[in-house]
Amino acid sequence: MSGLLALLDDVAAIAKVAASSLDDIAAQATKAGTKAAALVIDDAAVTPQYTHGFEASRELPIVWRIAKGSVKNKLLILLPAGLGLSAFAPWAITPLLMLGGAYLCYEGAEKVLHKYLHGGGEHVEEVTYSDPAHLEEEKIAGAIKTDFILSAEIMTVSLAAIPESNIWMEGTVLAAVGVGITVLVYGGVALIVKADDLGLFMARRGRLKATQALGRGIVKFMPTFMQWLTIIGTAAMLWVGGSIIIHGMEELGFGWLGHHIHDWSVALGHLVPWVAGVVEWSVTALMDGIFGVALGAAIIPLVSKVIAPLWAKVPKFKT
């Protein structure tokens, strides 16, 4: 009997350790995911374009296939690569973060300059395919290839946010972040691409006038919503990209810019002590974003003339 009680005590102790580990994983995944959350806004704004021009019945299958490709990017390629870096080359994490941050600055600055220098008009290359299935395959492959870049940044930011621990904890947290963010992004994309259809259905089939009015409101609101989502996504890219570069410079011993931004934000915060925290955060984010625009504009020629042509030669990823 005493042996059985001892066994039950051991089982209870193991269960407590397991529960504690699960709590730690959840807490760390939430923290790491929060660090990377700002990176997904632009992805949610851009991804719906890959369903443009297809029949409504193909929209969700396309989003689903892109989401599966994104999970493969994160779990089968980037997760092992991230764990390898953490174990054998932790010194490379900060430079890689800065490289990804520079790319975010470039992409954000390109959008800003395109809007104000070219009137915001989008040039769309018309390509004719006799087989719609071939066009769908091309769109999906291109979307997964583009997703790889953002997924790499998300996983690197998440890895840097995880406290030093063993490889199994890091792997579990990264996997949780990767899957969670993919569900968040592509679940949101699915809702966005079907919102118009839902609005039309409500406007045409709704039994109540209020339902019909709500449906018409959804249809009218979605273009405005997409515009604001794009603006917020671009601002987030510039803020996050600039912040990554500035913090990376501090880690590498070049902290003068970060220190100046900190001093300016604190000084302005002291002017309005009742909202000092909000002011300090806002000023810091604004300065990071301005730096992001300047850096992105400076590297546009390098990216457009050298890096982009090389990236275009990389084979498109298959689902």
Image: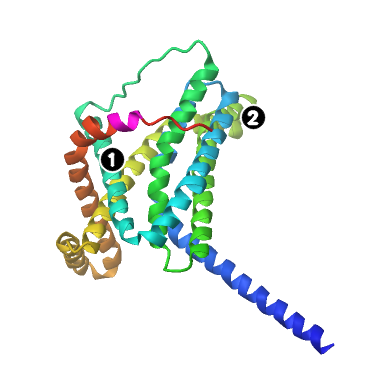
> Which residue is situated farthest in the top direction here?
130
When asked about the image quadrant of residue 300, the answer is: top left
Main SS type for the magenta part?
A: helix
Expressed as whole percent of the image width and height from the top left, the position of residue 274 reads 28, 69
For the question of whether residue 39 can be seen, the reply is no
Name which residue type carries label 2: Gly
Residue occupying image coordinates x 43% and y 30%: 316
* Element marked by disc 1: helix
Residues at discs 1 and 2 in contact (Cβ within 8 Å): no
Expressed as whole percent of the image width and height from the top left, the position of residue 210 reads 59, 34
Q: Where is 237 relative to 209, above or below?
A: below
Residue range (magenta): 309-313
Task: Please name the residue that numbered disc 1 is placed on.
Answer: 108
For the question of whether residue 19 can be seen, the reply is yes
Expressed as whole percent of the image width and height from the top left, the position of residue 117 reads 19, 29
Q: Tag 2: Cα neighbours inside 10 Å, few (<14), some, or many (≥20)?
A: some
For marks 1 and 2 on the same chain, the one whose residue lies earlier in the sequence: 1
Q: Quadrant of the N terminus?
A: bottom right
Residue occupying image coordinates x 51% and y 24%: 137
Q: Where is 138 relative to 88, above or below?
A: above
> Which residue is situated farthest in the front direction here?
88
Compare residues 304 and 215 and report the one nearer the observer. 304
**Mark sitting on residue 49:** none
Task: Please name the residue that numbered disc 2 is placed on.
Answer: 206
Name which residue type carries label 1: Gly
Residue occupying image coordinates x 24% and y 49%: 289
